[in-house]
Amino acid sequence: MRYRPFGASGGAVSSLTLSLGVDALARGEKPAHELIYSALEAGINTYSLETADPVLAEILGQALCNVERKLLNVSLKLGAGDGRRGSARDFSAEGMTAAIDRCLHVSGLGWFDLAILDEPGEHELSQSSLNALKAMRATERVRYLGVSGEGEVMDAYISTGAFDVLSTPFHVNVDWRIRSRMRAAREQDMAILAYDYFPEALNSERKAATINRPEPVKKGFFGLGAPKLQMPKDDPLATVGTFAFLYRTPHWTAEAICLAHAMTDPSVASVLVQATDQDRLAVLAAVPERDMPPGLSAQIEMARVAA
């Protein structure tokens, strides 16, 4: 595992963050504990609770109880409900304070290194709510405040200077708006966490080979109209300028390439990954130790520019 500075905090975080949601509990509490133990053995010291579910918080706290707390970085996502179906988003001062205090109580963690707001809307976060978060930071129940999302409102939240961390989607085909937002966050001395490194738009070879191709033009009446934009299947240049190479690189999976690429950006402190079993976690945890094949970064850039 490799480690990077966590913004201006002086702490170091693993290049991978294990993001834990209620799906981690699907096979029971014991497998969930074993998953976290495996993450620790792999060198992962950064954990993110996707919801304020008290059961999930308790399991994480139990699994981490024998590790020096200062060596860990644990975050709690707010605004995603408590993981139960139908649970509402709550960005009120009372709701967020109660969620943090409840999770701290059952987990025994002492504090959360980061409280991160999950895609707050333009008018969802009141001044009283922000004051409550600042009060929790002042009492060291929370060390840092963050905001997560990809909408344009993120630009406004970054510009306030009220947040220490930006959590953003980041992948091989991310658009210029995200890159510009990350640059603005760096200028504000914000730490950056990346998620959605392997988006649905790239999760099959067919999608990867056509993501940057123009849509075929439908023919009009009587077969008239422009011809379909389709290259011969045996044309060796048919997939040039696309992300098809993600599925044609020897000894690498498309997901592993995308994850490795996300970690090459020096502004990204850690990449959030999800795993519900030890085997998948082991595959993901092995990626930071591998060097990307020569020329792969250039192929990614060529395909991205062609978009």
Image (cartoon, rainbow, N blue to C red):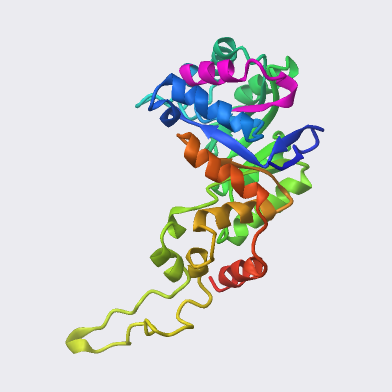
User: On the image, which quarter does residue 223 sit in?
Assistant: bottom left
Which residue lies at the image location 48% right of the left edge and 69% below the top edge?
A: 244
Q: Is residue 63 magenta?
A: yes
Above-or-below relation of 190 to 66: below
Question: Magenta residues?
Answer: 55-75
User: On the image, which quarter does residue 160 sit in?
Assistant: top right
Above-or-below relation of 300 to 95: below
* Residue 180 horizontal/vertical position (percent): 67, 56
Question: Observer-nearest residue: 107 or 174?
Answer: 107
Question: Observer-nearest residue: 141 or 279?
Answer: 279
* Residue 156 horizontal/vertical position (percent): 64, 44
Q: Is residue 121 left or right of residue 132?
A: left
Question: Observer-nearest residue: 132 or 187?
Answer: 187
Which residue lies at the image location 48% right of the left edge and 71% below the top edge?
A: 212
Instruction: Quarter of the image for the N terminus: give it.
Output: top right
* Residue 229 horizontal/vertical position (percent): 37, 82
* Residue 104 horizontal/vertical position (percent): 60, 14
Which residue lies at the image location 80% right of the left edge and 36% below the top edge?
A: 8
Note whether residue 161 is visible: yes
Question: Seen from this angle, which residue lies furthest left?
Answer: 222
Note whether residue 95 is visible: no
Q: Is residue 246 magenta?
A: no
